[in-house]
Amino acid sequence: MLGQPKTTGSGDVCVVVPTVREPECVRAYVANARRHGFDTDRLHVVLVTEDFCDTAEMAAMLEDLEVSGAVFDGTRREQWLDRNGVGDFSHLIPAASHAQTSFGLLYLWAHDFPYGVFIDDDTLPHDDQDFFGTHLRNLGFEGEIEQVASDEQWVNVLYQNVDEHDLYPRGYPYSAMGETVERTTATVDDVVASQGLWTNVPDLDAVRILMDGDLQGQAQTRTSAGDFGEDFVVAPGNYLTVCSMNLAFRREVVPAFYQMPMDDNEWDVGRFDDIWSGLFLKRACDVLGKQVYSGRPLCEHNKAPRSTFSDLTNEVHGLELNEHIWEVVDEAGADADSYAGVARDIARQLADGDFSDYENGAFLNHCGEYTLDWLDCLEALTDTQPTAVAQPVGDD
């Protein structure tokens, strides 16, 4: 069945690709792995899609590539959740939203994959960079690396050439702009997430795209490999935008990495799923002494033209909340000793908080409640035997 994976090797890297447009990007990433000598038997590709997409064609692509994998449209996601005893938590995966990557996290968690990789379908790997190998080396990195902080407690991941391009990424608070950057050297010994950055179309919010003079949802200003210097980590007590288009992580972070329930909500808030999950992750890393590594491998972001005003419609309901949610996160979880403990304390602060001064403030309560359900769902998955991973990929 399409919703059941096949295995062709050890399969320790679960690659999650949300897609309704360009699943063929997987071909480029598999080709990159083979070009650089990365063992593709280690990869298990999970395509998260919709009922209206050609899932049989996606499954055939995985067969043709001879890589382990599974295809999950909405119906098959529901079936998987039911089979694994967590059907009551289906609300955690919003309909027709990029935040459906949370399903990939549940799948990875249930099947004990030690590593996860998020890839967006509008990206391609750089031919000269070993995409998967670099991410896994980053996760295993130990040694000295540049550490970045600012007087605003926020680091612009595009800081290295900001004097030239003046770009701030999607999710960076407007109130934290104009920061003074401090660069030092740190000794790193426990990396749990590797964020690859992006060339071509930068990951900007709609307001910044409009200010850049682009009405097609992209940007007039583009980035190239020359805009990125040495890899870096962000200092404890500082935050960064975490974009899931090019991201690898260890399984252990999943409790603190729920992709927030965007789009399919009564407040119409969208496009902050990975940004806000990144706040939880960074706070947990600071509390537990872990690190988020940023830089290479780069990917080429080829965002398709679309109305900038459409993106603005999705973002505007959460813009004010984005200016303040990190302050709640920053005050929670200090005494926790696990990712789940940090996430649970943040979630309680959000669920029980009074955010009535903010437009759509009740959405923060909603996110807190859903994160508590997320933690309960992971506990339920831990207590059940996951569906076997040795079924063939093919037609229903």
Image: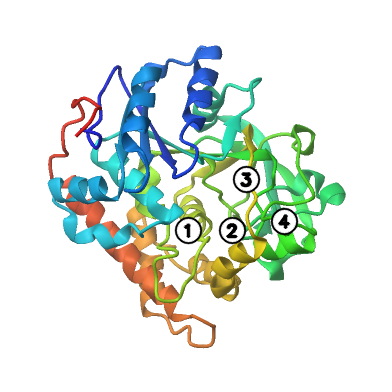
**Amino acid type at mark 4:** Tyr
Q: Nearer the viewer, residue 310 or 323?
A: 310
- As helix, strand or loop, the secondary structure at mark 4 comes to loop
- As helix, strand or loop, the secondary structure at mark 1 comes to helix
Q: Distance between the Cα atoms at labels 3 and 2?
A: 32 Å
Crowd band around label 1 with a 10 angstrom C-alpha radius: few (<14), some (14–19), many (20+):
many
Earlier along the polypeptide chain: callout 4 or callout 1?
4
Earlier along the polypeptide chain: callout 4 or callout 2?
4
Q: In the displayed structure, would residue 314 be above or below residue 320?
A: above
Q: Distance between the Cα atoms at labels 4 and 1?
A: 18 Å
Q: Are marks 4 and 1 in contact (CB under 8 Å)?
A: no
**Amino acid type at mark 2:** Gly
Question: Where residue 252 sits in the image (x, y, percent)?
Answer: 36, 42
Residue at numbered disc 4: 168
Residue at numbered disc 1: 273
Locate the N terminus by quadrant.
top left
Residue at numbered disc 2: 237
Q: Disc 4 or disc 3, which is closer to the eye?
A: 3
